[in-house]
Image (cartoon, rainbow, N blue to C red):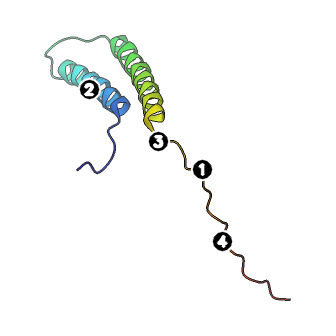
Amino acid sequence: MLRHEFQPGRLVAGTFLALAGVIYAGDAGDAWETPWFVVIPLVMGGLFLAATVAAVTRGIRRRRRPPHSTTTTPPDPQPDAPH
């Protein structure tokens, strides 16, 4: 059983940020040479894609949510105030 609901937008954002970390780690370890401006579009594109995925997911979940019940619960009675 899941402890929380799956949020694909966060998965996409985490994937792109992890990729940016791998790119910088490879540059720091002299595995390859990465210009500083390469990671900015990668992170910004990943955040934009994550926001789009999160918005689509929210729209899908709103459509699948069961309608609200038509009955309302009565308000809690208020205790008498001292005079």
Q: Please identify, in this view, whether the residue under mark 1 or under mark 3 is nearer the observer.
A: 1
Look at label 4 and name its amino acid.
Asp
**Badge 2: residue crowd in 10 Å (few <14, some 14–19, many ≥20):** few
**Residue 27 falls left or right of residue 78:** left
Q: Is residue 4 above or below residue 29?
A: below
Q: Earlier in the sequence, mark 2 or mark 4?
A: 2
Distance from Cα at disc 1 to Cα at disc 3: 12 Å
Residue at the spot of label 2: 21
Q: Please identify, in this view, whether the residue under mark 2 or under mark 4 is nearer the observer.
A: 4
Residue at the spot of label 4: 76
Residue at the spot of label 3: 66
Q: Earlier in the sequence, mark 2 or mark 3?
A: 2
Q: Quadrant of residue 81?
A: bottom right
Residue in the picture at 52% in, 42% down: 67
Q: Earlier in the sequence, mark 3 or mark 4?
A: 3
Look at label 1 and name its amino acid.
Thr
Q: Quadrant of the C terminus?
A: bottom right
Residue at the spot of label 1: 70
Distance from Cα at disc 1 to Cα at disc 2: 51 Å
Of all residues shown, which one is farthest toward the left? 31
Image coordinates of residue 32 in percent, x first then y, are: 17, 12
